[in-house]
């Protein structure tokens, strides 16, 4: 819905951004899926946040976001 079927269309930030996916910690991504992002339209999907997903479903969703779109070959910045 908000991020679009391909992760980049819609009113929300893109989820198919390879740099974002490379640097966001798994635990932080899961936290946002569970709790949402305060001050934004991003809702929490855990029951404690009023959402419909079980903890296992939230974990599967967060893991799927990182594995669905390709990530860059290297996360090491080019520093000269």
Image: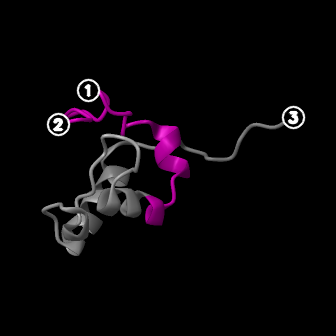
Q: Position of residue 5 (x, y in %)?
A: 19, 34
Label 1 SS: loop
Q: Is residue 11 above or below residue 56?
A: above
Residue 70: image location, x then y, percent: 40, 42
Determine if the magenta segment contains residue 78: no
Q: Which mark is residue 72?
A: none
Give the Cα distance between marks 1 and 3.
37 Å
Specify whether residue 63 is in view.
no
Query: From which residue to which does the magenta span run?
Result: 1-28
Residue farthest to the left, as pictured? 52
Reading the image, the residue beneath label 1 is 10
Which residue is under mark 3? 80
> Of residues 70 and 39, which is closer to you in this image?
39
Q: Is residue 59 visible?
A: yes
The residue pinned by badge 2 equals: 1
Mark 1 residue crowding within 10 angstroms, few (<14) / some (14–19) / many (20+): few
Viewed as shown, does residue 19 lie left or right of 55? right
- Mark found first going from the N terminus, 2 or 1: 2
The crowd level at tag 2 (other Cα within 10 Å; few <14, some 14-19, many 20+) is: few
Left or right of residue 2: residue 17: right
Q: Residue at x 30, y 40 (%)?
A: 41
């Amino acid at each position: 819905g908000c991020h679009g079927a391909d992760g980049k269309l819609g009113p929300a930030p893109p989820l198919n951004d390879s740099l974002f996916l490379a640097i966001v910690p798994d635990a932080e991504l899961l936290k946002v899926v569970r709790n949402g992002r305060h001050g934004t339209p991003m809702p929490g999907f855990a029951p404690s946040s009023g959402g419909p997903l079980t903890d296992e479903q939230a974990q599967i969703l967060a893991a799927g976001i990182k594995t669905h779109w390709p990530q860059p070959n290297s996360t090491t910045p080019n520093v000269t």
